[in-house]
Image (tube, rainbow, N blue to C red):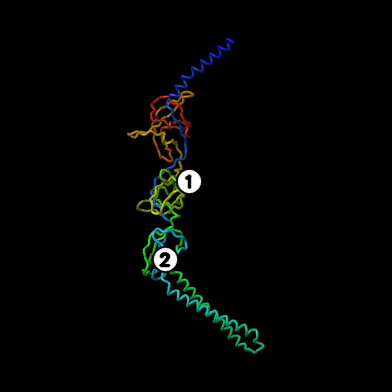
Amino acid sequence: MGNATRTLHGVLLSVCSLFPLFAAAQDLPGVQLETVSSEDIVQEVTLNGTVNALRVSGMSAAVAGLLDEVRVETGDRVSRGDVLVALDDEMVTWELAAARAEAEEARSRLEEARRRLREARSVGAGRNIAATEVSARESAVAANEATLARLEAARQQVEVMAGRHRVTAPFDGVVSERFRDLGEWVTPGDQLLTLVDTENLRLDFQVPQAFFKRIDDNSRLLVQNDEELSQAAIDVLVPINDPRSRTFLLRAIKPDTLKLLPGMAVQAVLRVTTGERGLTVSRDAINRYPEGRTTVWIAEPADEETWTVQEKRVRLGTGFEGRVEIISGLETGQRVVVRGNESLSEGISVRIAERESR
């Protein structure tokens, strides 16, 4: 019983002796570490662009006439096929009625000629109808068919002209401008209004020519959306260089999450791979000083609970996606402080407050 008591007493003393060490570790500054790694280096360039509609139509009439109806105002949303404006069609309506009557009359004459031909062929032998009479009736049918075809073509032409007295929307969109009003005389080609497709929008950016050959399927275009970046699909690269600005056109499809209108300015970040690999750390690991010096805090394990930090000067390369390329000063596998590095000093001990960020 005495031995058991002494053993228990010894264990309690050992545990109690660890409390000061544990408490001391808890009093140390807490940091988060990250392991220096090698990865593909990405280059970023900030782009300024414009939102453009894929379809913008200056609507005009195909015939001359007096504006009889204007059914839309600036800002109105219309659907494909909606009548936007109509010209006075009184004269063409009369012409169409006359053309239809003439065609109907010709159709009746043709039916009569065909009836007479059928009669001649069916009873001609019994009534001694001469072959020349049958031939004449065949010619009459052919002549009436030709007349009907000519008059039907004339009728269709007048119908087309009548239809052109109405200007309809070729696609869903918004009327952005209106140039003419009721009672004005217009001629073919006079612009009456502008219709803009506000649903199918494209984002146009002028990109420095040095990036043209480097844009591939791995490139990403991130469009600024308030405080966030939304990825946009690259639609087309126009391989024509602007000699004045040394840029080319990159056109992207507007992400559905962005609320944009034609003519708006937009900013984006283009990320392209350089084809090279290098050491990178989180942007949060970098300490920048007014004189231009840049450093990181390297952590080395002191024991199971604590680490010792040392400030190391580094030379930076390109920055991308919250990462910074380290050109010199670090090696793969080293641990750097990415959180809690605001008040560190050379050689102090720290504890791990959070798991590694990578």
Q: Residue 274 got which mark?
A: none
Residue nearest the observer in this picture, 276 or 342: 342
In which quadrant is the N terminus drawn? Answer: top right
Left or right, residue 11 beside residue 341: right
At a point 40% along the width and 65% down the height, the residue shown is 70
Residue at 49% from the left image edge and 73% from the top image edge: 156
Do the CB atoms of the residues marked 2 and 1 lie less than 8 Å apart? no
Q: Secondary structure at mark 1?
A: loop
Name the amino acid type tagged 1: Asn
Q: Earlier in the sequence, mark 2 or mark 1?
A: 2
In the rendered image, the vertical position of residue 263 relative to residue 59, given as above or below: above
Quadrant location of residue 298?
top left
Question: Where is residue 93 shown, x and y percent of the image?
Answer: 45, 74
User: Looking at the picture, how far across and down is residue 292, in whole percent?
Assistant: 34, 35
Q: Is residue 80 above or below residue 335?
A: below
- Tell me which amino acid carries mark 2: Val
Total numbered labels: 2
Q: Which residue is mark 2?
A: 85
Q: Position of residue 130 (x, y in %)?
A: 62, 89
* Label 2 SS: strand
Binning the other alpha carbons within 10 Å of mark 2 as few (below 14), some (14 to 19) or many (20 upward) gives many
Which residue is under mark 1?
218
Q: Is residue 195 left or right of residue 118?
A: left
Q: Which is nearer the eye, 163 or 90?
A: 90
